[in-house]
Image (spheres, rainbow, N blue to C red):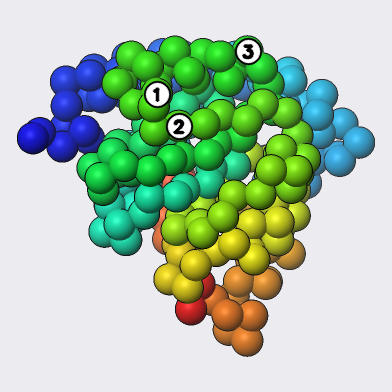
Amino acid sequence: MKPAITSEAVVQTLEKLYADAATKHHFPRTKKENSPIDHTDEKAFYKSMSHAYMAVNREFGNLLYALARASRATTVVEFGTSFGISTIYLAAAVKDNGGGKVVSTEFIPEKAEQAKRNLAEAGLAEFVEIRVGDALETLKNNPVQSIDFVMLDGAKSLYFDVFKILEPAMKSGAIIASDNTDSPDLQNFLDYVRFPENGYITSPISTHGGPGGRGHEITVKI
């Protein structure tokens, strides 16, 4: 059977979404680049970007698939669905691993609905559960068990809080892939996973899907 990641449905859906993202990914900044968002305005900030993809680039998407596939992940949690591009890579890996579920969270209902349509078009809807609302609530109130893989790509100031909710359910060997790690809002999260006594081995990486590249962190629970 042909792998999901190279299936016509997945390839064509990703092509369409990346083409659309090229026109909608960039948005006016209300703050200086790489400076923290005012937390009091954070929800309004993300609502204002309801049409912005903020998608992972192809290099990082392929890496997400490769890591989830190689680790045989069947239970994946994603913080930040947006329009579902990274979700497609993760769901394709879960399908190719024999089945399982990607539990993905999205703050904006309209984005969640479009992501569901995109996943259906890619033939991967049955492998994804999208939880709409504040991830701190949707993940805490209905805990995910036995987590193999975590993708962090939502509100940067919430990475550490989301991570701490998920941490007790992460298996030994679980992979945590984090996007946009050049943001100053992630320092508490990075300080935690980069301190070996906390039980993680981690490494920063960079991909070059756009001008200046993108910062990421790949972490393993030991």
Disc 1: CA contacts within 10 A as few (<14), some (14-19) or many (>=20): some
Quadrant in which the N terminus is drawn:
top left
Nearest to N terminus: mark 2 or mark 3? 3
Looking at the picture, tell me which residue is in the foreground, 102 or 202: 102
Q: Is residue 217 visible?
A: no
* Mark 2 secondary-structure assignment: strand
Residue kind at label 3, given as amino acid type? Glu
Q: Position of residue 45 (x, y in %)?
A: 77, 27
Residue neighbourhood size for the residue with mark 3, other residues' Cα within 10 Å, grouped as few (<14), some (14–19), many (≥20): some
Q: Residue at x 38, y 50 (%)?
A: 74
145 in relation to 59, above or below: below
Across and down, in percent, residue 37 comes to 79, 40
Q: Are discs 2 and 3 less than 8 Å apart at CB?
A: no
Q: Which residue is mark 1?
A: 125
Q: Which mark is residue 128?
A: 2
Q: CA distance from mark 1 to mark 2?
A: 6 Å
Which label lies toward us, 2 or 3? Answer: 2
Q: Residue at x 51, y 57 (%)?
A: 147
Amino acid beneath label 2: Val
In the rendered image, residue 19, in percent from the top left (x then y), is placed at 35, 16
Helix, strand or loop at label 3? It is: helix
The image position of residue 67, as x and y in percent, is 33, 56
Q: Badge 3 is on which residue?
A: 110
